[in-house]
Amino acid sequence: MSAGEISTPQEYIGHHLTHLQIDLRTFQLVNAHDAPATFWILNLDSMFFSVVLGLIFLVLFRKVAKNVTSGVPGKLQAAIELVVGFVDANVRDMYHGKSKLIAPLALTVFVWVFLMNFMDLLPIDLLPYIGEHVLGLPALRVVPSADVNVTLSMALGVFILILFYSIKMKGVGGFTKELTLQPFNHPIFIPINLILEGVSLLSKPVSLGLRLFGNMYAGELIFILIAGLLPWWSQWVLNVPWAIFHILIISLQAFIFMVLTIVYLSMASEEH
């Protein structure tokens, strides 16, 4: 369905919630309404915007790092120094181990997630209109963090680091004992401990990814509902207050994702 075929609010909302998808077996765009959900179907728009925003983060921070001055900083350098100092203070407060990875990881998570969330503040029809009328794309969603595949993929990366630091700090034997001898330190309770600790361990990436996805999907949906159900001349009455409030949401969600990443890795690095 193209934007030119949209005639009802329901079709408008459905169109804006449709991903630009590609079949990796044929490398052809597929109709998201008819395509079955399989491993080989990739949300091309989510991947594209995630990579582009990641590159913007890397290029911007690298440029500032190369041109940093010890005197009075420019506005961009001052802003980035504030972000770096803010992230560094949180890492020092929450991570009690020693690792050269945690601070850069926390900075990357915070800024990258914030940039992905920030896409939700763009006019809802701007990039989809350009995609359809300039590039001929059938659909386009521009908020990567409103795609559960992106948020769970990031959470899976954090989960792999949790396992890595748990085994690194405690050893395979220590990590196994942590799963089997807690909270009840008796061999007879090993099956119960394994179930409790296993659920606790697996819930970390699931809650991490779904929390970000749920909040950003809801925020995106509200913008779509306002645009789809109200006349164009009255949309600003709700769009402007929601956008102002949404600035807090996108910043808070990036902060929560970063904080939970640090806390989970700190817990994994502790020796019992």
Image (cartoon, grey):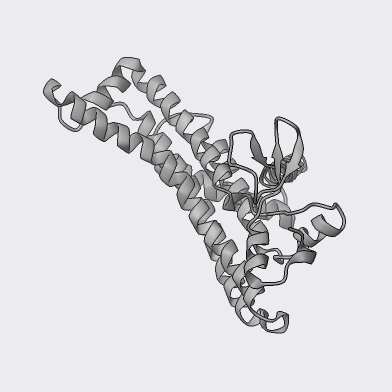
Q: Residue furthest front?
A: 34
**Which x, y percent locates residue 87?**
53, 47
As rendered, which of 267 and 152 lies closer to the eye? 152
As rendered, which of 91 and 264 lies closer to the eye? 264
- Quadrant housing residue 67: top right
- Quadrant housing residue 6: bottom right
- The reply, left or right, for residue 29 in relation to residue 244 is right
| Residue located 56% across and 47% down the image | 110
Q: Is residue 31 visible?
A: yes
**Which x, y percent locates residue 44?**
70, 43
Q: Quadrant of the N terminus?
A: bottom right
Q: How many callouts does the rendering have?
A: 0
Q: Is residue 72 visible?
A: no
Compared to residue 155, the image places residue 257 above or below, namely below
**Which x, y percent locates residue 63?**
77, 42
- Quadrant housing residue 166: top left
- The reply, left or right, for residue 67 in relation to residue 120 is right
| Residue located 49% across and 39% down the image | 155
| Residue located 59% across and 77% down the image | 241
**Which x, y percent locates residue 191?**
20, 26
| Residue located 54% across and 64% down the image | 248
Compared to residue 181, the image places residue 78 above or below, namely below
Q: Residue furthest right?
A: 134
Compared to residue 191, the image places residue 50 above or below, namely below
- The reply, left or right, for residue 64 in relation to residue 36 is right
Q: Quadrant of the C terminus?
A: top left
